[in-house]
Image: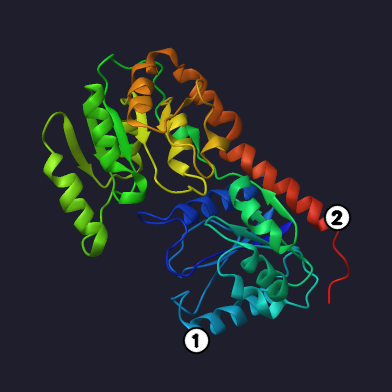
Amino acid sequence: MRILLTADPEIPVPPLHYGGIERIVDALARGLAARGHEVGLLAHPGSVCPAARCFAWPGASSGRAWDTLRNALTLRRTVRHFAPGLVHSFSRLAYLAPLRFHTLPKIMSYQRHTGPRQARWGLRLGGPSLSFTGCSEFICSQGRPGGGRWDPIHNFVEPSQFTFTETVPHDAPLLFLSRVERIKGPDLAIAIARAAGRRLIIAGNHADSGPEHAFWEREIVPHLGRDGIDYAGPVDNAAKSALLAKSAALLLPIRWDEPFGIVFAEAFAAGTPVITTHRGATPEIITHGETGYFAATLHEAVSAVMALPSLSRRRCREEAERRFSAGSIIAAYEALYLQRLGTRGTAT
């Protein structure tokens, strides 16, 4: 197959620092190439992904109308030049508009919250040859009322990049690993760790201004360096792996409906169970009592911390390899591509 992948213009593929979607696109391109497919990539001009052909967006912003028009026309020219059998977009829906009447199979992937309105617009802009994927069944369920075909395909990690530890000391710390903002629940994690008498490491970036900075200053900073609560700052992949490997659990008591939460799969790759809330896609990822626990109250969360020794870290690693590895998810995309190409009509 010849496949054209697209990613938004703001961040290179792969990303230099943060950029979960761009990291997924990079691994998908490499995995498809390893399976013998010819992959083209249309993305940020600084992208160094080893695709067979790389093309660059001229417009640097997804939010500017002029850049959107330029990028949409660039996608049309790239399709003519590269002649893919299928286009898989991880970028803006509007970029597909010039391909509205092209029967070329097109797949639009949603990694964020969506809804029926976006699906209806997608079908208008992308035409009848457009279908959708969501990073979870939760995301697909948001879009399906708007029409079209929706396939849930989870995000993935590469387990080989994470150090697996089968056992940790009885006093191993808990780990909060995410953006340090209210919806992720770092203040709740602090309260849980204190009530359970456990150390907590907080890792991730925080806002430097606005309401989230005020939350950081008011709810987090006063606790750092006290009662076993420490801040590790933003972390790269190597530091993330090291922190997960030595932690008793990933403690992420989210206050929002998580679209997927790649950090949960990363924790499993290290053998680290998860304590979180039953919201969004978390029930698709975590098996209560096997790879982690759901907790709705402080009491339930403390009980979950106390019950961590009963969980198998090897079971968590096996879950990452079986359900969330790059190989298994890339195979799912490959099967979807073949299915879509099998239903393709005559190109215009």
Camera-side mark, 2 or 1? 1
* Above or below for 143 versus 75: above
Disc on the earlier residue, 2 or 1: 1
Q: Position of residue 336 (x, y in %)?
A: 74, 50
- For label 2, the crowd category at 10 Å Cα-Cα, with few meaning under 14, some 14 to 19 and many 20 or more, is few
> Quadrant location of residue 12?
bottom left
Q: Residue at x 69, y 75 (%)?
A: 125
Say which amino acid is labelled 2: Gly
Q: Position of residue 266 (x, y in %)?
A: 44, 36
Q: Decide: marks 2, 1 in contact (CB < 8 A)? A: no
> Quadrant location of residue 230?
top left
Q: Nearer the viewer, residue 253 or 129?
A: 253
Looking at this view, name the residue that lies furthest to the bottom.
Answer: 66
Q: Residue at x 36, y 20 (%)?
A: 303
Q: CA distance from mark 2 to mark 1?
A: 36 Å
- Residue bearing mark 1: 66
Q: Residue at x 30, y 33 (%)?
A: 175
Say which amino acid is labelled 1: Trp
* Above or below for 37 versus 95: above
Which corner quadrant holds the N terminus? bottom right
- Residue bearing mark 2: 342
Kind of element beneath mark 1: helix
Looking at this view, name the residue that lies furthest to the right.
Answer: 346
Kind of element beneath mark 2: helix
Q: Nearer the viewer, residue 76 or 20?
A: 20
Coloring scheme used = rainbow
- Is 259 positioned to the left or the right of 121 in the image? left
Q: Nearer the viewer, residue 57 or 302?
A: 302
Q: Nearer the viewer, residue 289 or 264?
A: 289
Whether residue 141 is visible here, answered yes or no, is yes
Q: Position of residue 44 (x, y in %)?
A: 47, 68
